[in-house]
Amino acid sequence: MKRTKVIDILKSTEFGKDVCVKGWVRTHRSSKAVDFIALNDGSTINNVQLVCDADKFDAELLKQITTGACLCATGKLVESQGKGQTSEIQCENIEIYGLCGADYPMQKKGQTFEYMRQYAHLRLRTNTFGAIMRIRHNMAMAIHTFFHNKGYFYFHTPLITASDCEGAGQMFQVTTKNLYNLKKDENGQIMYDDDFFGKQTSLTVSGQLEGELGATALGGIYTFGPTFRAENSNTPRHLAEFWMIEPEIAFMDLDELMDLEEEFIKYCVQWALDNCKDDLEFLNKMIDKGLLERLQGVVNTEFVRLPYTKGIEILQEAIKGGKKFDYPCNWGDDLASEHERYLVEEHFKKPVIMTNYPKEIKAFYMKIDAEKPVCMGKEMEETVQGTDVLFPQIGEIIGGSVREESYDKLMGEIERRNIPMKDMAWYLDTRKYGSCPHAGFGLGFERLILFVTGMQNIRDVIPFPRTPNNAEF
């Protein structure tokens, strides 16, 4: 008999029909006359109940069926007599595909997420991680649908690169060299002429620079793929391997960029509300009781647009009023998560798009503002047309900017910052040949999943997290 997915079984009203389901046991409880087995195949957060009359089954077979075991069950679909479900299966035959012993790590209730990270290969079978992974899939679908409907093209940028987009140098090197016998020049510098690519290469930290090339040819593109940061950050918000969404659009100004960022986030959140109802309700009940309200609030509210200088003035006023922060927040400082969350969660109580940051704390490719800002009566240093979208509980979820289209201005920043550009002539060509105004942003996919699921640690929203001293599975 052909298998029917649990999600379809639970929607069906064809009572009396013979059905076949396959999946993994969530729970098994026995009474004298009947065994009740909750089966889940990953297609939904909800289980289908198998009702097994004890006199129809071998007692030893039923005894072997424990949490985690994999079964094929056939029987009749009937209306459920119990609460919380409309249908169940009056089981007539069970085939055990795989037994699960008493040492199965995921069978106990109340396990911590930290404990479950040790078993990332098995935690996916739990209700919580099943819900997260289904939502993750839906967010990927939302991203592709949003940009496709906008007429932007999915653009594949390289994972192996010779350029450091952010200029921070925190990159994973890619090499085929024998690390025990490195070839060096007379100055002790490693020579790469015998390496696979003939030069020093690394895993990408961003597809932005290559994405800009796509925008100047196709008008509007987006990337969606893995990126890598060799940043020794053991925090709930950082991963060494994560996924990024990076649209780049020709002829877009700052206001249009902010419009796109807000529209994009709202579209993704609404997609989750429309397509992940059962999973979100489960997470709202079990993980974060304010989740659904917060998601609905993002969709229904207009984001605040806040210049950095005004944000600093608000934070300084809060400090004067007795608010204490662990980190300084003077003009010119890169705001910490606590400052961002104060603005979002306490002051405005809604998402904030912060703009016009000091030039010195942002990347070399951002367009410099025409006028210098005034903060508390004093003229400050130059600012750039950068944008950060700040969210409740998360802090920064999007970083973007209008890109500098002037060759001379871009070269001036590169030289001033002493950025090695020996492998960047191709990037500067976009400013030499038919340069155009353009803008774009980057969204860390896992940060989006954190917000949509209500989870607190970024290691719990990716199947197999890569962090300092952790590359298991």
Image (cartoon, rainbow, N blue to C red):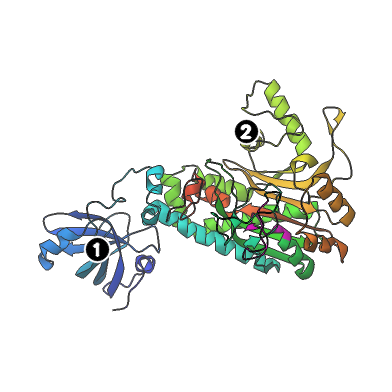
Circle 2: element type? helix
Residue 48 percent coordinates (x, y): 31, 62
The one nearer the camera, 110 or 186, is: 186
Q: Is residue 458 visible?
A: yes
Could you say which quadrant of the image residue 219 lies in? Answer: bottom right
Q: In 3D space, how far apart are the residues under numbered discs 1 and 2 (Cα atoms)? A: 49 Å
Q: Residue at x 89, y 54 (%)?
A: 408
Q: Residue at x 87, y 63 (%)?
A: 432
Query: What quarter of the picture does the C terminus occupy?
Result: bottom left
Residue for badge 1: 50
Residue 262 percent coordinates (x, y): 68, 52
| Left or right: 110 as drawn, with respect to 94 | right
Residue 241 percent coordinates (x, y): 55, 53
Neighbourhood count class around disc 2 (C-alpha, 10 Å): few under 14, some 14–19, many 20 upward: few
Q: Residue at x 38, y 69 (%)?
A: 8
Which SS type dominates the magenta stretch? loop
Circle 1: element type? strand
The one nearer the camera, 362 or 79, is: 362
Q: Is residue 54 visible?
A: no
Residue for badge 2: 346
Query: What quarter of the picture does the N terminus occupy?
Result: bottom left
Residue range corresponding to the magenta coloring: 189-209
| Left or right: 95 as drawn, with respect to 232 | left
Q: Is residue 42 above or below residue 235?
A: below
Mark number displayed over residue 32: none
